[in-house]
Amino acid sequence: MAHSPSQTQTLNLPSLLFVIVLIAFSIHYFFFSKPSSSSATRRDRNAANPEHIEQIAQMFPQLSRRDIQWDLQRNGGSVQATTERVLSGRGLERPPPSFQPIQPPPTSTASAPPPPKSSHPDLITRYNLASRVSAASQSVASTPGEAQKTPVWSQNKAERQTMLQKRREDMVLAARRKLEERERERARGGT
């Protein structure tokens, strides 16, 4: 049986090139491109948690919430990575103008209860300095010469601990005296 030219199938050069290009695009599409549905899922998964934004904003009030949210979104929501970036001095990159941060839902301030008092007591209460405050108000402030009589550093750990604790207490009391003086000046200037 003889084969007629219509029955033999041949592949000419343009058809061969077309098939190769088609295979290359198929491989590229299936293995190297990300479908659009997964990009939306990835964006939602990398969206910054409002609690994480609030946590970093409380630690670093000088940063804008938009910058924090951008950095959290870029690093997969890692608070630690964002904190390390700020503490290392590199700062946070500015988000591009096209970045639209997700705004947290507004909370109703009318129905919200008033915020509770801070659980952190003031420094006088924290370091039990109330007796020294009353004694310091009755006596005259210490002179700079008295502070220089104490040794600068000790080899004994207990002495260093005591000395540093006393310095801390003195600094707290000095700050309190300055604040009281400032308030008295303001009161005198106001009336």
Image (cartoon, rainbow, N blue to C red):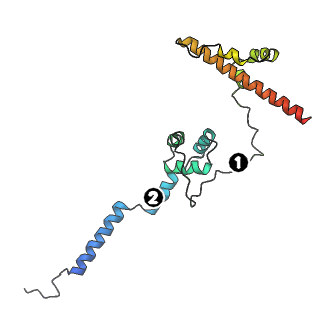
What x and y, as percent, mark residue 25?
33, 69
Dot 2, crowdedness within 10 Å: few (<14), some or many (≥20)? few
Image vertical order of residue 28 relative to residue 73, above or below? below
Q: Nearer the viewer, residue 178 or 131?
A: 178
What residue do we see at 81% from left, 18% from top?
137
Q: CA distance from mark 2 to mark 1?
A: 32 Å
Q: Nearer the viewer, residue 71 or 92?
A: 92
Query: Residue 146 lies in what quarter of the image?
Result: top right
What x and y, as percent, mark residue 129?
72, 18
Query: Residue 51 lies in what quarter of the image?
Result: top right
Q: Which residues are magenta?
A: 104-108
Image vertical order of residue 146 relative to residue 4, above or below? above
Residue 131 shown left or right of residue 40 in the figure: right
What residue do we see at 50% from left, 51% from top?
74
Mark identifier at residue 38: 2
Q: Main secondary structure of the magenta part?
A: loop
Q: Nearer the viewer, residue 48 or 170?
A: 170
Image quadrant holding the C terminus, namely top right
Asked whether 107 falls inside the magenta stretch, the response is: yes
> The disc labelled 1 sits on which kind of residue?
Thr
Q: Nearer the viewer, residue 109 or 134?
A: 134
Dot 1, crowdedness within 10 Å: few (<14), some or many (≥20)? few
What x and y, as percent, mark residue 123?
70, 24
